[in-house]
Image (cartoon, rainbow, N blue to C red):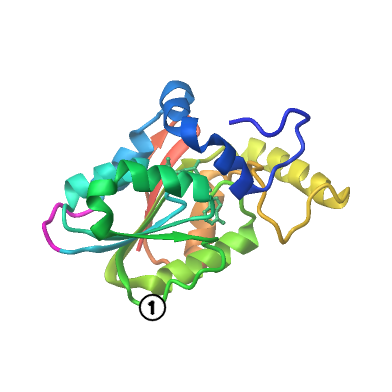
Amino acid sequence: MENSENNTPVEIGAFFDDKASTYDDHQKENIANFGYRHMNVAGAIEETSRELRILDLGCGTGIELEMILDRASNARITCIDISGGMLEELRRKYADALKQLEVIQGSFLDIPFGEENYEYVVSVLAMHHFTYPLKLNLYQRVRKALRAGGMYLEGDYYLPPEEEGQHLAEYQQLLNTGTITPDIGYHIDIPFSIARQREVLLEAGFLKVEVIYEGANAAVFSAC
Ligand SMILES: C[S@@+](CC[C@H](N)C(=O)[O-])C[C@H]1O[C@@H](n2cnc3c(N)ncnc32)[C@H](O)[C@@H]1O
């Protein structure tokens, strides 16, 4: 998905508000590996009728929710997203399941997750806009939010190591020129390599980090 016409970075909530009504169609038509990340994230969730507690970071319009509810039909899912437009689509699509969903608008970088609250924390396509220090802090909070035996599942873009540096250098250049400020989230892609993603999850305190799916510039991680 493109930024503004003159390529000025757009604040992330505004970006997705603008795309919300066409987001699902765009994803299906244009994204290589569409659905595989979502399916592999959902597929790692226990098949059960128990009331699992699940936290979805950057749930968007809820593409992964359908697959998660197929596995755990009675799950209670807390859905966080910064874009009101994306959440409006989610509420419309899941009108019949809203009693199972707690929908929260805000940044997962700020909203408290509590401690030992969830069997699973999941995130699909939402983490490739953040730097190492922000991800480290977030993953430390995710680890604390998991119950004993719980698991973090993340499906996203990841790049070969040589391309990772390029994106980061461009991001740094935007900071240096004052085009962006570090305290605001922008729709700028700075995906990690698989090795760096593993590193940040391990540094956050996860003991077992695995790649459970790998495709073209795509992967799904499990961490527990
Ligand atoms: C590419 S969409 C993915 C949506 C959905 N998970 C999917 O796979 O279709 C990324 C979502 O992450 C949300 N997002 C990005 N940064 C966020 C933040 N700091 N807090 C909450 N949501 C955020 C965006 O608003 C957007 O809805």
Q: Is residue 60 visible?
A: no
Residue 207 located within the stretch drawn in magenta: no
Q: Main secondary structure of the magenta part?
A: loop
Q: Position of residue 106 (x, y in %)?
A: 53, 61
Furthest residue in direction top, as rendered: 29
Examine the rendering and report whether any part of residue 208 can be seen.
Answer: yes
Q: Is residue 115 left or right of 71 when viewed as pictured?
A: right
Kindly state the secondary structure of the residue where label 1 is placed: loop
Q: The disc labelled 1 sits on which kind of residue? A: Glu
Image position of 46 (left or right of 165) = left
Q: Report the residue at 35% width, 43% height from top.
A: 92
Task: From the viewer's side, name the closer residue of 193 and 75.
Answer: 75
Residue at the outermost left position: 49
Identify the residue shown where x is 38% and y is 45%.
90
Task: Please state, as top left, top right, bottom left or bottom right, where the N terminus lies in the image.
Answer: top right
Is ligand 1 less than 8 Å from the beta carbon at label 1? Answer: no
Image-based side of 167 in relation to 87, left or right: right
Q: Where's residue 204, x and y in %?
A: 50, 68
User: Residue 220, how many percent across, how many down?
Assistant: 39, 44
In front of the other: 48 or 222: 48
In the image, which residues are magenta? 45-50
Tell me the quarter of the image containing the C terminus.
bottom left
Position in image of residue 93 (x %, y %)? 32, 41
Name, please, the residue furthest toward the right. Answer: 177
Q: Judge left or right: residue 214 versus residue 5.
A: left
Nearest to the observer: residue 166 or residue 127: 127
Q: Determine the residue positioned at 24% across, 59% down.
A: 99
48 shown above or below 155:
below
Q: Which residue is mark 1?
A: 115
